[in-house]
Amino acid sequence: MVAPDVASYRQLEEELAFLLGKRLWRFPPWEMPPYDRTPPHPRTVAARLELLARLARGERLEGVLLTALPAWLQRLPPPEAVAASVWRLAPGDRLDLALVETRLIEAGMRRVVRVELEGEFAVRGGILDLWPAGEAAPVRVELWDDEVASSRRFDPTTQRSTEPIQTLSVIPAREALLGEAAKKRFVAQFIERFPQHRRHPLVRAVEEGRAHPGLEWLLPLGYARMVRLRDYLPDEAPVLACGDLEAARARLAEQLKQQFAIAQAAREPALPPHELFAVEAGLEAAPLPKDTDVEPAPGVADFAERSNPVQALVDGLKQRLAEGWRVVCVAHGPGQLVRMREALAVGGVELADGAWPQNPPPPGRAVGVVGWLAAGFVDREQKLIVLTGREVLGQRPPRVRRRRARTAMDAIASLAELREGDPVVHEVHGVGRFAGVETLETDGVVSDFVRVRYADAEVLVPVEDIGRLHRYAGA
């Protein structure tokens, strides 16, 4: 299923996650604008690479794959590059820690003394601590000589080990997957395409296997061919459009044109839009079928002319329940479920606790659950009525939560927006002043850091974690 834009993707993701659970697969779009120097969110990267790696290995995924038009048209590394980038650790495996360290750095992870954040790793004797992208907690791998003896999750605050795990998938923290051959090709192509930038810091970063702001938008330089998500999918996989993709494509093309012009005006190395997105390609997506037995659910708004709209709605539900229909009320939270239960109980319909959609209620029963749906529906074939707060209480559904929303702050769109002395907020350390970007070497690894100055200290934030910084807008 292809959503037209990021906002539609988020709403569908919430609804389908509720309806399908683990049968929903995601290929989310990058959240930053085209040509922006902010790296994609690590969890977005993890979701994308995990899906691509599974498809590259030939796994057959049961369920629904959801994406958005920008990601559907985006040019991606070929399957062989993605398959080689994701690797697994299990007890009994043999590891060369020196090679593992190199591989983790090339995967975008940072070596630290103590692992506290996603994307970090540490080596202490025969112990490897790492927090791969997409993992809920870091993992401690204990070696006996060069063999993996055990793997256990641990608490990043107390550093104490918790539950054991059998297999760990190490997913890169970035999508700039450049092996040795790809590095050489990238550097050669970069210098050929942008000779005036031959001394650009990005060149050295690629040669040393380090991340660099904006590298994702130059990735095609590292490969002889790029592909699309459609190329990863089986030929017989149906593709459905969830909205007006043609209009969305026109908006995307215009946005790419404008952002490319801005990058050129800033004299930054930038590839033309057609090398990053197949905007002119066929959409290969059919519209959602309309000839189904599913229709919008009735709600209090449909009985606005009645003296008691809720009672009119309840009377209709009681008739359906008597005919053996099932009724499910989906609330976006426990509080709303209480209000829905009270409103229906006044009219004579009692809501039992339910576990829909995993366990449908028996015929003639009404249940309530907490979940997320934008609106209710009626499925005549299944004799099922699903209602939300919109239909029962006349309330609009809540906005889909955004991953990086913060009160009284504006998310930093790119490094270029910051000026020395600007107030910023770090998710952990609080309000400080932006004090510039610099390149430092730690434990033999050269990395770029944002310096944030506080009253009695300074904090160095890796450029890859710029998403943890936000411009402070006051209380």
Image (cartoon, rainbow, N blue to C red):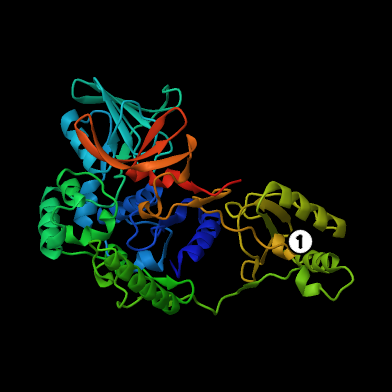
Crowd band around label 1 with a 10 angstrom C-alpha radius: few (<14), some (14–19), many (20+): some
Residue 396, relative to residue 459: is it above or below? below
State the residue at coordinates (76%, 74%).
302
Quadrant in which the N terminus appears: bottom left
All told, the count of numbered labels is: 1
* Residue 432 can be seen, yes or no: yes
Q: Circle 1 — which element?
A: helix
Residue 74 position within the rendered picture, expressed as x and y whole percent measured from the top left: 31, 65
Residue 410 position within the rendered picture, expressed as x and y whole percent measured from the top left: 51, 52
**Residue closest to the far front:** 421
| Near-viewer residue (446 or 223) | 446
State the residue at coordinates (16%, 47%).
204
Report which quarter residue 280 is drawn in.
bottom left
Q: Which residue is mark 1?
A: 393
* Residue 78 can be seen, yes or no: no
Residue kind at label 1, given as amino acid type? Leu
State the residue at coordinates (18%, 36%).
102
| Near-viewer residue (200 or 29) | 200
Residue 53 position within the rendered picture, expressed as x and y whole percent measured from the top left: 28, 52
| Near-viewer residue (113 or 123) | 113
Direction from residue 310 to residue 290 in the image, left or right = left
Direction from residue 29 to residue 199 in the image, left or right = left
Direction from residue 290 to residue 433 in the image, left or right = left
Residue 205 position within the rendered picture, expressed as x and y whole percent measured from the top left: 19, 46
Residue 231, relative to residue 475: is it above or below? below
Residue 127, relative to residue 257: is it above or below? above
